[in-house]
Amino acid sequence: MAIDELSHIFSISDVSFVQVQQQLKNTDLFNLVWLADNTDNDAPTLKDINDCQQVKLEMIAEQDLSAHSSSAKLVLFNDLNWQILFDFIKVCEANSINLNICKLVKPSDELDGAISFTLTDAITKPIQTELNQWAEQHDVELCYVENGPSIDKPGLLVMDMDSTAIQIECIDEIAKLAGVGEQVAEVTAAAMRGELDFAESLHARVATLTDAPVSIIDQVADNLPLMPGLENLVSQLQSYGWKLVIASGGFTYMTDVLKRQLNLDETVANQLEMKNEKLTGKVLGRIVDANVKAETVVELAHKYNIDISQTIAMGDGANDLVMMEAAQLGVAFHAKPLVRAQADVSVRTGGLDQLLYLL
């Protein structure tokens, strides 16, 4: 590797993109230039990475950074290499998207890192769809963010609980212990796909738990498997003064555990009725459905004096779409196809802390 004051030059046969990411971690904006030989001459007409010997990260001078500020970006991550990067740039060029200006992003040691491309213009929905399809085919993650929140300003993150903050659907686990697991799981899956009204499906599922002992709730609450990356995401955002909230169609019994464990600011969920150490099969009070989740985003942003432009809602199911729409940035995490198609951005694999790449 050769280095001068404003550039880094790497031999792509000797140094992997992962090694570059690990060494440089976070960078200011730079021009990404592919070189055909060792002469440091740009080769803009290269059609194949096999024609390329080096790549140059030509850092943009500090006094020129403001000229490249933008409200739109493409963020690429998850098991990147030079071939993927080269191919992605070519796909974008074919769609008249210039990706010369970018930066490396590595918010914490726990994360592998990402590359974020600054865009001069917004991208249309059809092109977004084409790029997302390319990313799926190549097993990488790609997020297009326009006017997204900044981690450097006070913000609010509202997360779903089941299959987002934690790796299970709590009601399914409770139902298994109560002996009605298969019956309830089928209803849960249909509700998450948007095929059933959430409130009706919740009442139906909870009714199957009538007379089940409260001890089965304790068993689930005491063994909640956190989603990978959750603790890192929470600690990183808390260090920047963000407010963190869970709004769940699940149950307060579990959200209260997470609130204590992670020091969350608020949790909103449904309350199971219990009498004589048994479940009655009923839910107390107002059902926390899609609309209540959305109201939570707006109400808590107001409560904490956070501008709505600094809000994020993240979930996996159809009942999360309304709150995603209410927030500035709606993130589908490990979500169903219906949800991925309607969210602002989608993360199909990996940990929750990858959200940090987008801020």
Image (tube, rainbow, N blue to C red):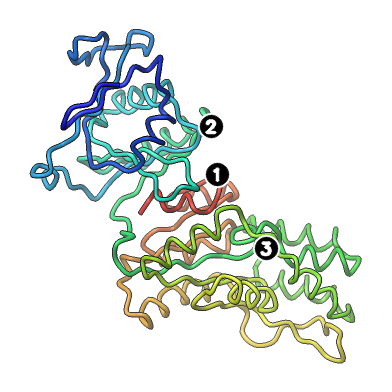
- Crowd tier of the residue under label 3, counting other residues whose Cα lies within 10 Å: few below 14, some 14–19, many 20 or above: some
Q: Position of residue 49 (x, y in %)?
A: 37, 13
Q: Which residue is mark 3?
A: 196
Q: Is residue 292 above or below residue 126?
A: below
Q: Position of residue 251 (x, y in %)?
A: 68, 75
Q: Nearer the viewer, mark 2 or mark 3?
A: 2
Q: Which of the 4 image quadrants contains residue 61?
A: top left
Q: Which of the 4 image quadrants contains residue 279?
A: bottom right
Foreground residue among 157 and 26: 26
Q: Is residue 136 above or below residue 277?
A: above
Residue 348 is labelled as 1
- Crowd tier of the residue under label 1, counting other residues whose Cα lies within 10 Å: few below 14, some 14–19, many 20 or above: some
Q: Earlier in the sequence, mark 1 or mark 2?
A: 2
Residue at 30%, 21% in the rendered image: 1
Residue at 73%, 66% in the rendered image: 170
Q: Which residue is mark 2?
A: 139
Q: Earlier in the sequence, mark 2 or mark 3?
A: 2
Q: Position of residue 109 (x, y in %)?
A: 46, 47
Q: Is residue 74 above or below residue 54?
A: below
Q: Amino acid at mark 3?
A: Leu
Measure the alpha-carbon separation of dots 2 and 3. Answer: 31 Å
Local secondary structure at mark 1: loop
Measure the alpha-carbon separation of dots 1 and 3. Answer: 24 Å
Taking the image as shown, residue 254 lies to the left or right of residue 228, namely right
- Crowd tier of the residue under label 2, counting other residues whose Cα lies within 10 Å: few below 14, some 14–19, many 20 or above: some
